Amino acid sequence: MKKMLSGVLLFCSVMTVNAGKTLKLKMSDSARADATEILQKAIDSDVSKIILSKDTSPWITRPLILRSDLELVIEAGAELKAKLGEFKHLNDCLINAIGCKNIIIRGPGSLIMPKKDYQDADRYDKSEWRHSINLRSCENILIADLKIIGSGGDGIYIGSRPNLKPWRGARFHGEKYAALPDHCKNITIDNCVIDNHHRQAISVISVENLLVRNTRMSNTDGTAPMAGIDFEPNTSTERLINCVLENCLIESNKAYGFLIYSKLTQAAPPVSITVKDSIIKSGGRGIVLSMDPGIKDPARGFIKFINCKIIDTADSGIEFRCHYANGWEAIFENCHIENTAIRQPGRSPVMISMAPSSAANTGNILFTNCIVKDKAERAMMQYNNLAGKPVVENVSGSVMFNGRKVDVAQYVRKHKMDVSNVLAIAKLELAELFPAEGYELKARSKSQPRLIFRDKVRFLIAANQRKTVECA
């Protein structure tokens, strides 16, 4: 211990260690440009609590790796900030905890990463994994009273052990992680502001017992999915058990407020997610509940929204996307959906959608004492069935739609959502795909929407022989 602390003292003007092994760090001139060494040595020591004090400059650091049984406090006005020009690995994160237990990370200070720096393709390889806080296979973690701003990925990532094989320049891989569980457990996020991230404010991959309360998740914009919070298990061996969001504000996220895209099958434990007393507003879609189209036996369980408001969204307030009827139940109790699909007049406040590859029926949805208010003259609910054959089943309950009580099951029958609709498939000749002679391609105006692709796509581009075609 003495040897470790003497090394730290070389970089620190003041260090206080009390009887309870609390270490308070104050900035020295030599640490202002890069405090990584002092911070990592303090973390690796056997102190139980580290306090970063406020200074005239932030604590500049490269990636930090936490250990178990540690409390990290960032005082009011203090900033722990990612160093510019670093974080070159695709999944370099500001704070990393892998296989750790009993950690507290709390403010009221700030964690800051320069999102625009990572979005510069001339300086960085494209990535969506440069998170502010990276939790993998961790247990008993509290993140509280923090401002978490501007990462190159997620504000907080909650997932399973790293891959055993080297992965996209990953720092963390190898056999030593093979024994770690495939989920985090007992994670609490309380009274945080998680703002302006590249991919998500919070990504939840695999967890048992998650509580997010009194927290704002806002202004995500960068790369898909661009949600406030995204539940997205990667494999059927992972889990989403006892996840609770309470008294949260999910606001102005580019594409989604609340999103789940699940690959969980019935081999996984039943899903249990509850969102209550929360507001989802502005941004793209409000709530999207979806299952992977290729799964035939989706996980059971429930996703429940109680006393929530979904308001002022550019797209639909709620969308059930490949929400198979043999999977979890979606429950909405005393929810208020108002002024949604503002920029999408062809869509409805509530959408039920099926991908072309979907084969199973959609449904297992219950509305109880919900209110939908819409200024546009359109249907309350719409079935966008790109698959043709699957139908809507087991959708029930009651909704007050613009002051009129609607029996949802009757509404489904009246609009023939329970009847197959086989789509006609048009046959196109290759010649029809080319533009007419004299056609002039004009540049996209700023008012036109961008096309966003997450996976690989193919384009067919017309061109004259021996002519160069440029795509911007």
Image (cartoon, rainbow, N blue to C red):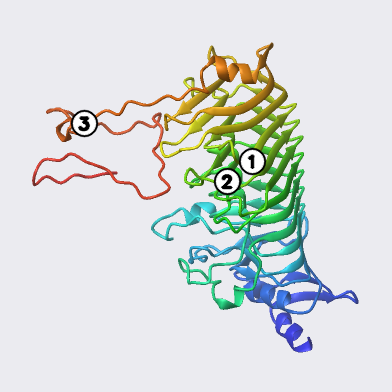
Q: Amino acid at mark 1?
A: Trp
Position of 102 with respect to 421 (left or right) is: right
Name the quadrant of the N terminus. Answer: bottom right
Q: Locate residue 367, reporting x and y percent.
A: 69, 26
Q: CA distance from mark 1 to mark 2?
A: 8 Å
- The residue that label 1 is drawn on is 328
Q: Judge by depth and name the residue closer to the eye, 256 or 89.
A: 256
Q: Judge by depth and name the residue closer to the eye, 396 or 435.
A: 396
44 versus 280 height, above or below? below
The label on residue 298 is 2
Name the quadrant of the C terminus. Answer: top left
Q: Amino acid at mark 3?
A: Leu
In front: mark 3 or mark 1? Answer: 1
Q: Locate residue 281, reporting x and y percent.
A: 64, 31
Q: Are marks 1 and 2 in contact (CB under 8 Å)?
A: yes
Q: Amino acid at mark 2?
A: Pro
**Sequence-wise, which precedes: disc 3 or disc 1?**
1
- The residue that label 3 is drawn on is 428
Indicate the quadrant where residue 348 lies: top right
- Identify the residue at the far left of this view: 466
Q: CA distance from mark 3 to mark 2?
A: 36 Å
